[in-house]
Image (cartoon, rainbow, N blue to C red):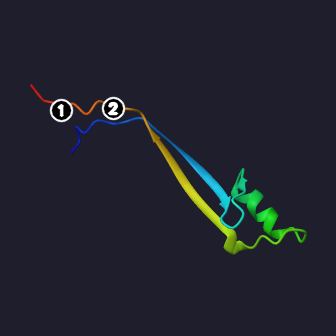
Amino acid sequence: MTDLPKIPATAKEIIRNKRTGKIYDSKSHFDADVADANTDTTADDFRQDLEIQVTRVSMGALTKK
């Protein structure tokens, strides 16, 4: 298992209001929206997604010599 190839990937966290679809810069910005009395956003509206982008890799078989 130690000779498995490592594939470069990047992860991006997406914080969103699941009711309105608004995307926030961070969890703290969402929390500020919840604390704001001028909005109807509640903690139940929180949605967190993780988007992972992987570098394209050939599907050819690797063989050892």
Task: For the N terminus, give its image quadrant.
Answer: top left
Percent of width and height locating residue 48: 60, 60
- Which mark, by number, is residue 20? none
Q: Amino acid at mark 1?
A: Ala
Task: Describe residue 50's horizontal placement relative to residue 3 as left or right.
Answer: right
Q: Quadrant of residue 56?
A: top left
Percent of width and height locating residue 22: 72, 57
Q: Amino acid at mark 2?
A: Val
Residue that protrudes farthest toward the front in the picture: 20
Q: Residues within 10 Å of mark 2 (few under 14, many from 20)?
A: few
Task: Describe residue 7's horizontal placement relative to residue 32 as left or right.
Answer: left
Numbered marks: total = 2
Residues at marks 1 and 2, CA–CA distance in whole angstroms: 11 Å
Residue linked to disc 1: 61
Identify the secondary structure beneath mark 2.
loop
Percent of width and height locating residue 32: 81, 63
Q: Residue at x 33, y 32 (%)?
A: 57
Residue that protrudes farthest toward the top in the picture: 65
Q: Quadrant of residue 8?
A: top left
Percent of width and height locating residue 42: 75, 73
Q: Residue at x 83, y 69 (%)?
A: 35
Pointer 1 with pointer 2, Cβ within 8 A: no
Task: For the C terminus, give its image quadrant.
Answer: top left
- Which mark, by number, is residue 57? 2
Q: Residue at x 29, y 30 (%)?
A: 58
In the image, residue 49 sits, relative to residue 7, either above or below, namely below
Q: Residues within 10 Å of mark 1 (few under 14, many from 20)?
A: few
Residue that protrudes farthest toward the right in the picture: 38
Identify the secondary structure beneath mark 1.
loop
Q: Quadrant of residue 40?
A: bottom right
